[in-house]
């Protein structure tokens, strides 16, 4: 579904912040297992994987919160993703615990400097936390006196100019210089030019259970955003939509007997990327790709073609020694260890190396048992169809009747009735009574019809002779 990289912290936190919304354990476990990322990465790539700015990573290097592990391509610094996440986790926990208090302090009219001192963080950190919550720089009616006076003065200058007063006179009336008057006028013009979309006004957060009232910008609303008061609520809503889409998909899979990519990968004992790349090239085609924002790269497969493909794949184990190697526990462990995947999986799941090795051995053992015990070839029949016995009985009756007629009416030189003639007459009679058993008229293809009757009758005639006498 290329090899996927590790999930960014922001995406994983969306589930934690959802409260009542929680993913099924099997999806969390499967996600941790299938998306490990390399531990040492260039600092640019590490910033993308961990969702941490490069400037912050450089500052952490300077403060020795994380360490440099050599140089990568183009002399870029190599840093450990594990170390970065060990720094992120306590900081994120502090942030999530501080957000309610920050909201209370902002409602009391505290500035970013006062909030930072109260929470024990830097003023920049308080600014970014407040911005993520979508709170204004100042609480309503709590702006500093100098700021209120400046805004009132600028508003008076703009109103006077709109009424027809020259800028210089409006500035002198407001008690300031003409340069300040022009600056206030230009600022108002810029604000009007930036308002491409009308301001929507205050609204309540769309997340169920959140009663915060906020005022998004017109641009956000025009582009389909501005529904939630903060990123925390947006993450929670996104997790809820994912769970709803997952539940709908599970209902459809049960109703139509379908498999998705992860199910096919589990059935084959491989990773999803193998199903969508190598197995697809070998002929395993999905019937549909889901176009759902919350379930990207999800393909649906019918169960019967998947099982038929698996049977055909199992038949090749005896002729392809390379395939059989991947059913050897020691070989699989050797490859995973050489690629560093055992260590990454242990870190992702929080397990020891021995526990991960035991899990991998068990999975390989179950895969080998499933493939080697796979039924090969056509299923063994439970016996001949019922109408074969009917044909055999009619064959004997027809043969007896023809022999009696031959004995009574034949002249010298007339041949005895052959089994082909008897089978042909049986086919004619059966077609008259049961035309649904035939895809053609026996009269049009007498030899083919007679061969079919004889092929069905002969085993039944030979069966009693094969049973030993008591």
Image (tube, helix red, strand yellow):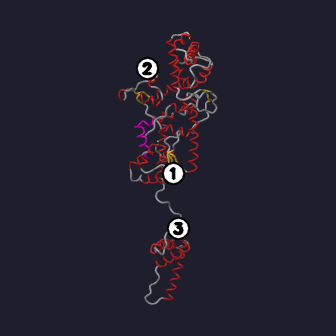
Q: Residues within 10 Å of mark 3 (few under 14, many from 20)?
A: few
Q: Is residue 117 visible?
A: no
- Which element carries disc 2, helix, strand or loop? helix
User: Going from the N terminus, do you reach mark 2 or mark 3 first?
Assistant: 2
What are the residue bounds of the magenta stretch? Answer: 326-343
- Disc on res. 315: none
Give 197 or 136, whichever is nearer the viewer.
Answer: 197
Q: Element type at marker 3?
A: loop
Which of 228 and 308 lies nearest the eye of the viewer?
A: 228
Q: Quadrant of the C terminus?
A: bottom right
CA distance for labels 1 and 3: 31 Å
- Residue carrying label 2: 62
Magenta stretch, main secondary structure class: helix
**Secondary element at image label 1:** strand
The residue carrying mark 1 is: 302
Q: Earlier in the sequence, mark 1 or mark 3?
A: 1
User: Viewed as shown, does residue 71 lie left or right of 183?
Assistant: left
Residue at label 3?
384
Kindly check if marks 1 and 3 are in contact, taking CB atoms under 8 A apart as contact: no
Residue extending furthest toward the bottom? 412
């Amino acid at each position: 579904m290329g090899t996927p990289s590790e999930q960014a912290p922001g995406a994983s936190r969306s589930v934690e912040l959802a409260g009542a919304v929680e993913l099924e354990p099997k999806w969390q476990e499967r996600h941790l297992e299938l998306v490990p990322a390399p531990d040492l990465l260039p600092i640019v790539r590490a910033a993308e994987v961990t969702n941490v700015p490069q400037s912050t990573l450089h500052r952490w290097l300077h403060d020795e919160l994380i360490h440099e592990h050599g140089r990568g391509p183009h002399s870029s610094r190599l840093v450990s993703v594990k170390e970065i996440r060990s720094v992120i986790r306590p900081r994120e926990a502090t942030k999530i615990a501080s957000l309610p208090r920050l909201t209370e302090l902002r409602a009391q009219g505290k500035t970013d400097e006062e909030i930072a001192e109260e929470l024990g963080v830097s003023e920049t950190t308080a600014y970014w936390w407040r911005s993520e919550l979508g709170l204004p720089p100042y609480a309503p009616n709590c702006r500093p006196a100098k700021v209120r006076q400046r805004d009132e003065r600028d508003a008076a200058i703009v109103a006077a100019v709109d009424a027809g007063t020259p800028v210089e006179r409006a500035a002198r009336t407001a008690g300031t210089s003409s340069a300040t008057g022009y600056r206030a006028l230009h600022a108002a013009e810029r604000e009007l030019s930036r308002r491409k979309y009308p301001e929507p006004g205050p609204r309540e957060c769309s997340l169920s259970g959140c009663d915060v009232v906020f005022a998004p910008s017109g641009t956000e609303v025009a582009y389909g955003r501005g529904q939630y008061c903060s990123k925390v609520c947006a993450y929670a809503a996104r997790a809820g939509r994912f769970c709803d889409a997952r539940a709908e998909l599970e209902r459809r899979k049960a109703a139509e007997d379908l498999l998705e990519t992860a199910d096919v990968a589990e059935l084959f004992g491989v990773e999803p990327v193998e199903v969508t790349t190598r197995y697809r090239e070998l002929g395993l085609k999905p019937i549909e790709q889901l176009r759902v924002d919350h379930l990207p790269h999800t393909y649906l497969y019918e169960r019967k073609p998947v099982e038929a493909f698996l049977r055909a794949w199992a038949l090749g184990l005896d002729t392809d020694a390379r395939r059989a190697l991947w059913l050897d526990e020691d070989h699989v462990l050797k490859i995973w260890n050489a690629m560093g995947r055992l260590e990454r999986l242990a870190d992702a799941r929080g397990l020891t190396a021995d526990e991960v090795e035991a899990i991998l051995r068990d999975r390989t053992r179950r895969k080998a048992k499933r493939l080697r015990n796979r039924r090969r070839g056509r299923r063994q029949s439970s016996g001949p169809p019922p109408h074969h016995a009917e044909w055999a009985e009619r064959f004997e009756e027809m043969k007896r009747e023809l022999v009696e007629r031959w004995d009574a009416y034949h002249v010298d030189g007339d041949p005895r009735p052959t089994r082909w003639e008897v089978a042909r007459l049986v086919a004619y009679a059966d077609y008259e009574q049961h035309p649904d058993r035939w895809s053609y008229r026996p009269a049009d293809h007498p030899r083919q019809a007679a061969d079919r009757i004889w092929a069905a009758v002969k085993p039944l005639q030979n069966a009693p002779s094969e049973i030993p006498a008591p």
